[in-house]
Amino acid sequence: MSLLHYMRAMQGIIGRELWRFITQRERFISALVRPLVWLFVFAAGFRAALGLAIAPPYDTYILYEVYITPGLCGMIQLFNGMQSSLSMVYDREMGSMRLLMVSPLPRWFLLLSKLLAGAGVSILQVYVFLLIALMYEIEAPWQGYLLLFPALMLTGLMLGALGLLLSSFIKQLENFAGVMNFVIFPMFFMSTALYPLWKLKESSKILHALASYNPFSQAVELIRFAMYGQVNKYALAYTLGAFILFSSLAIVGYSPSKGMMARKGMG
Amino acid sequence: MKKCLYVVGLGVVLWAFNAEAETIFVSLEKDNSIAVVDPLAGKLLKTVAVGRRPRGIALSADAKFLYVAVSDDNTIKKFNADTLTELADLPSGNDPETFALSQVDKRMYVSNEDDSQVSVIDVDKNTVLTRIPVGVEPEGIAVSPDNKWVVSASETTNMVHWIETKTYTRVANTLVDPRPRALTFTADSKQVWVTSEMAGKLMILDAKTKQIIKELVFEVDGVTAEKIQPVGVLVDKKMQRAYVALGPANRIAVINVANLTVEKMLLVGARVWNIAFSADQKYLYSANGLSNDISIIDLEQLKVIRSVGVGTNPWGLAVKP
Amino acid sequence: MYFIKQCGYLWLTVFTGLSLLFGTQVDAKSTVKPASLLTVNIAMLAQLDKPAINLLTIDPMVLDKGELGAELAIQENNITGEFIGQSFALKKFIVPANANAETVFNEHIAGKFNYLVTLLSPEKTLAIADLAQHQAMLILDAATVDDSLRNTACRDSVLHLLPSRAMRADALGQYAVKKRWHRWFLVVGAEPADQLFADALKRTAKRFNIKIVAEKQWSHTFDARKTAQAEIDVFTQIEDEYDVLVVADEQNLFGEYLDYRTWSPRPIIGTQGLSPVAWHPTHDLWGASQIQKRFKIQAGRWMNEQDYAAYLAIRALGEAVTRTHSIAWQALRNFMLSDKFVLQGYKGSALSFRAWDGQLRQPILLAAPRSLVAVAPIEGFLHPKTELDTLGYDAPESLCKRKE
């Protein structure tokens, strides 16, 4: 196995994912519309018009729109990660997965490539979203947009790995609705995407605890700090840890001998 | 230390714009002290005890002396602006809330809130020249740049009183909207800009006719009209832009002077009270009474750069170049 | 058997003189200079209370009803008036508890005054309002808190300065919602007024989805074997869990005994403990410290609710006269009920009258004896027009049929 093999395989997977993303116009549009609706309808209707108190990384008072923007970037990646998992199920059902899995390259590599491909797509979506947000004066310093890239890569990988892990449990396509209800929504609502931790603490101790342990919260915080050119080390470590955990479990899950695959009669 | 890219970057940008270090003095109404802030670093340097309930604060024209009205001690204290050592107590009369300094003849005009009068003080001789009766609860006070007029706004009487500096007599009273708080002259001494806290309005008075010539009602998206309570008002030297602090609406309105429209609303801390320009007028500083901080605004980009915690109930600011 | 006090005449003379001295009067709002002095004569009719039981000997008994607030306001009106050629005079009619206020009204006020500030019981207020029905008179009620006077028994010519019981209960309810005190244990005194406040609290509970888990009547039974301590222990042993004990005891006959003595440790709110009030000594926000100081210097004591209401009543008249340059009662009444009327009352928001029932819309202070805890409307309670109308009877709910 030469390095070239690896490269070509990865290129193929990423290329396929990007191609799929670009050709499925509805998916691209829906990926953008969802956070934009939140930004302009939800945030506007929500009336935190008097500004949110200062908490790092912000240096001054901010409007609610500004606060939820990193959370919505996280939302894009969360949906994208889950959608990738849907595509895995789809691939599995259609049999193209089988084709991939029988390639001589190691399975972990293929799955990682898949994750990178998913993260790449989500980063593309996030930047387009931020570009639109920029027109509404939701802006970060330019350094922030640069630092955002590695942060988004890590959070994208982490959320993708979570999706991959979940997909190893899902038998059929229809179960994506279940993922929406039982994974995406709880993760999103019980996080710092919509409200800062101190605000959650004011209303409920349980919610505060759930939100602070929610890996999605930490991903959002990593994005939030990166947008302002800062590194939140705790969030970085937490997200990295979660990524390693989820991806290892996913690899185990997809391994034909001991994973879910075997039990599901695949592989 | 989370010394981050942004702070460094910002620091460099700030340094490039404003190489000279400024100092901001902020009176802290409930801390009995003033805060000394370095706006460049965005840092509170120290807090200095000055007396009970400090409110009005200003520097002499040469920036050598700092005056602070300590209302509950019934005096205005004079400090060395460099060392902050106390030099004298001025005979301000009872409960001095705020005051205006004439840049020409070293006269100080003091609002005595409890006594419904304006005291005129010779700051060099440290004597009272006269006391002029005005309406109930006089607060905002300003001297025209040409030193001809002093205007005093009384909060409960709802009037602007015009005092001629030549004779120290009140020659006219203009009825304005309820609870006028702050007022300022334009650089050409031709207009007085007054805010009405209860009506949420800015009124422009003509110095010749003493009449209201223009009005502007403020509106903020998502904030009820009751919360819009204009207080501090400033017009820049070039008379291009004016700035009005909107109190509990937590905003500073940026006004285009030429066509009297609001260009932008800047979000600052809670219950923004008084505002002050940097010496070069490239920055604006606001005292945020309820969130206990000051906000630093870049006027070229029209952006709030940062907010710095200073102490309990920041009231007014003085900027030393 | 009544005595008449006079005040304001000194001010009147002083300011007439002063306004002649200062010649130029520029008035921005009208081009016409006031040609002659406008004088507004205001009557004040107050009836002293029957001697009440004073549970707390530390609180001084205040016998003068709102007079000192009215005097302060007259002075302020006159300072403003001096600049624009207006003067205000107050004539006070103070009747003892057992006298007939209607007779005083008929003999000395009816036909002689257009403006009357009343500090009377709800029944007397209504009786006077009915007597004044066909007269050119505007009544400013600075004493009652009854919702009936603002609803079914409302009168066209009456404006109410103090917040009604419903407004107070709503203020308490909003704060309870914020603090998640969803279960109330209601303790009601034996006086009829207590029942009225309890009714207001029940209306609030319904509006804010608060559950009244238990309601108990406090009866003043005297049992020699029990001390207050033991009595309250037993009295507050109820089966249901509750978050706060809400007390309705307007005369202050037992409410102060409850705190620290309840069976379960729970806060006391209502007429004692955390109370919804129009004015309070702990209030020093929005320039209030200024008027607190002015009043205290003049009166030698803290300003109470009725002082505040009488102050506002006369300031409201002053404001209306200043803005309209008129002393015609119909014009003033219409102006005061219009959107243009704005009154500064040291409570952060501009005060104005509700056109549908003549109630002054105002924030309500939620105060503990030594601390101002919150100011209602509490943030988050929204209203399409003004958040102040989240308190009490809003236009659609009002049962008042006023001639607009």
Image (tube, coloured by chain):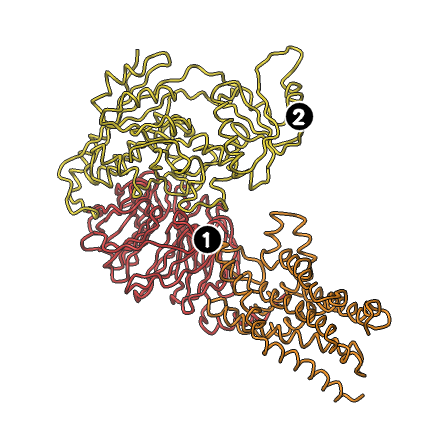
Letter of the chain in orange: A
Amino acid carrying label 2: it is: Ile
Q: Which mark is residue B288?
A: 1
Residue at 53% from the left image edge and 27% from the top image edge: C272
- Does dot 2 land on a helix, a strand or a loop? loop
Three-letter code for the amino acid on which mark 1 is drawn: Asn
Question: For the residues carrying marks 2 and 1, which lies nearer the camera in this image?
Answer: 2
In the foreground, B107 or C194: C194
Instruction: Identify the residue at image location x=78%, y=76%.
Output: A108
Colour of chain B in the rendered structure image: red
Query: Horizontal and vertical percent for residue C214?
Result: 61, 27
Mark yes or no: residue A61 visible: no
**How many other residues sit within 10 Å of disc 2, few (<14), some (14-19) or many (≥20)?**
some
Up-down relation of residue A2 to residue C138 (above or below): below
Q: Which residue is mark 2?
A: C238
Q: Which chain is yellow?
A: C
Query: Quadrant location of the C terminus of chain B?
Result: bottom left
**Can you name the residue that lies furthest to the right here?**
A257
Question: With respect to residue C47, does B259 lie above or below?
Answer: below
Label 1 environment density (alpha carbons within 10 Å; few <14, some 14–19, many ≥20)? many
Q: Report in which chain the residue with disc 1 lies.
A: B
Residue B49 x/y as whole percent: 49, 49
Most distant residue in the left direction: C35
